Amino acid sequence: QVQLVESGGGLVQAGGSLRLSCATSGRTFSSYVMGWFRQAPGKEREFVAAIRWSGGSTYYVDSVKGRFTISRDNAKNTVYLQMNNLKPEDTAVYYCAADSTRLMSTTANRYDYWGQGTQVTVSS
């Protein structure tokens, strides 16, 4: 059974940092693209960042460039999202997802597997 399990969300003040983790199991994701998306109340799910598990190339939405870093740990089968200098507009439920097409897509419906999400709240 494929599972993506996010953790690391919480409440933080503006300017603070959080590191989200996405633990994967149930299959090998070495040929996949792993992505982070977020969804704020009343808004559509938004692409945040992606990484190719093999090779490690990355892509970010402009609004998080220079503040967020996506990475992966092959030994732990885990993907991370380090979030620094957080802003109130970063408040959302953050989801981890896996895409088998290797296209570094920013479109949610391209992704095959999803986690349950973790809440990030940034206070001003």
Image (cartoon, rainbow, N blue to C red):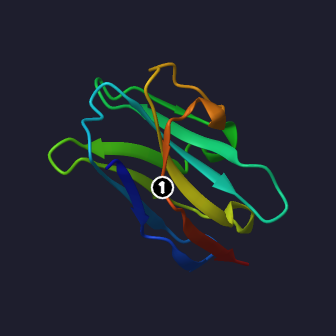
State the residue at coordinates (36%, 53%).
Answer: 3
Residue 34 appears in the figure: yes
Residue lying at the far right in this picture: please name it.
42
Is residue 9 or residue 95 the one in the foreground? 95
Mark 1 Cα shell of 10 Å, populated few (<14), some (14-19), many (≥20):
many
Image coordinates of residue 72 in percent, x first then y, are 30, 43
x, y percent for residue 25? 27, 50
Residue ID at (39%, 53%)? 4
Residue at the spot 29% in from the left edge and 23% down from the top edge: 55
Residue 97 pos. (x, y %): 49, 44
Question: Which residue in the protein does label 1 denote?
Answer: 115
User: Which of 121 and 35 lies nearest the eye of the viewer?
Assistant: 35
- Residue that extends furthest to the left in the rendered view of this protein: 75
* Quadrant hosting residue 15: bottom right
Q: Secondary structure at mark 1?
A: loop
Q: Which quarter of the figure has residue 61?
A: top right
Q: Is residue 17 left or right of residue 71?
A: right
Q: Is residue 34 above or below residue 95?
A: above
State the image coordinates of residue 84 (x, y, percent, origin top left): 51, 60
Classify the position of the C terminus by image quarter: bottom right
- The amino acid type, in three-letter code, at marker 1 is Gly
Could you say which is closer to the camera, residue 88 or residue 116? Answer: 116
Q: Is residue 84 left or right of residue 5?
A: right
